[in-house]
Image (spheres, rainbow, N blue to C red):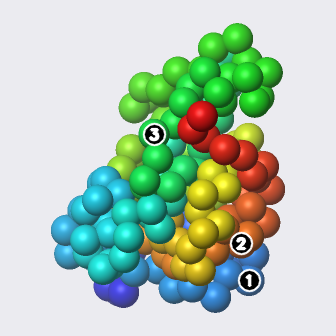
Amino acid sequence: MPEKLHPNIEKVAAVLGEHNVAGEIVVFAEATPTAATAAAQLGCEVGAIANSLVFDADGAPLLVLTSGAHRVDTGLIAETVGAAKVKRATPEFVRTATGQVIGGVAPIGHPAPLRTLVDTWLGRYEVVWAAAGHPHTVFPTSFAELVRITDGTPVEVER
C-alpha cells in the first residue's frame, strides 16, 4: 500500500485489526465503484463482491451488504426490518451515516454502528470482497466474518 493512505482507509484498517481480520486491504490504481469493475480488477465473479448499500429506512440509516449479483428488493427489506418505507439514500445521507462516499463504503469504520443486513447469497463464496472506505480499495473476507464484524443479520435481499 502507498505510504500515506486516505484517513477512511486507515480507519477501516484499524477496525479490521481490532476484529482480527486477516485479509489485507488492496489498493487499486483506478477506482472500482461498481461490483463489475471490482470483479474485473480482482478476477472473481461479480457475485463475490459485497456491495455496501446504504438505505434510508424511515429516516434511519440501514446498511445492506449485498452480492454484486443481486438487486435489493426494498419492499422485502422494509418487511424484514419493520419499516414503513426503505429507499435508496442520497449521497449526503450516506456520507453523514458512514463518513465515506458512495462507491467506497466499507461495511465497518463508520462514525457510529449501523444496523446491517448481510445477503445470504454471499455465503456461496469462500472469499468475498468488500470496499475498504474509499473507491480505490477492497479487502478479502467471508460471509461469516462480515456477519461477525458488522454484527449483521443474514437475510435474503431478493424475492
Residue at x 73% of width, y 70% of height: 144
For the residues labelled 2 and 3, say whether their Cβ atoms are less than 8 Å apart: no
Q: Is residue 115 visible?
A: yes
Q: Residue at x 63, y 51 (%)?
A: 119
Q: Which mark is residue 20?
A: 1
Disc 3 on helix, strand or loop?
Answer: loop
The residue to which callout 3 is attached is: 71
Q: Secondary structure at mark 1?
A: loop
Label 2: which residue?
145
Q: Give x and y (percent) for residue 121.
A: 60, 58
Of the residues shown, which amino acid type is indicated by label 2? Glu
Toward the front, the furthest residue is 159
Residue extending furthest toward the left: 30
Residue depicted at x 40% and y 80% = 26
Q: Residue furthest top?
A: 84
The answer to which of marks 1 and 2 sits earlier in the sequence is 1
Q: Is residue 54 left or right of residue 15?
A: left
- Kindly indicate whether the residue at mark 3 contacts the one at mark 1 (C-beta within 8 angstroms): no
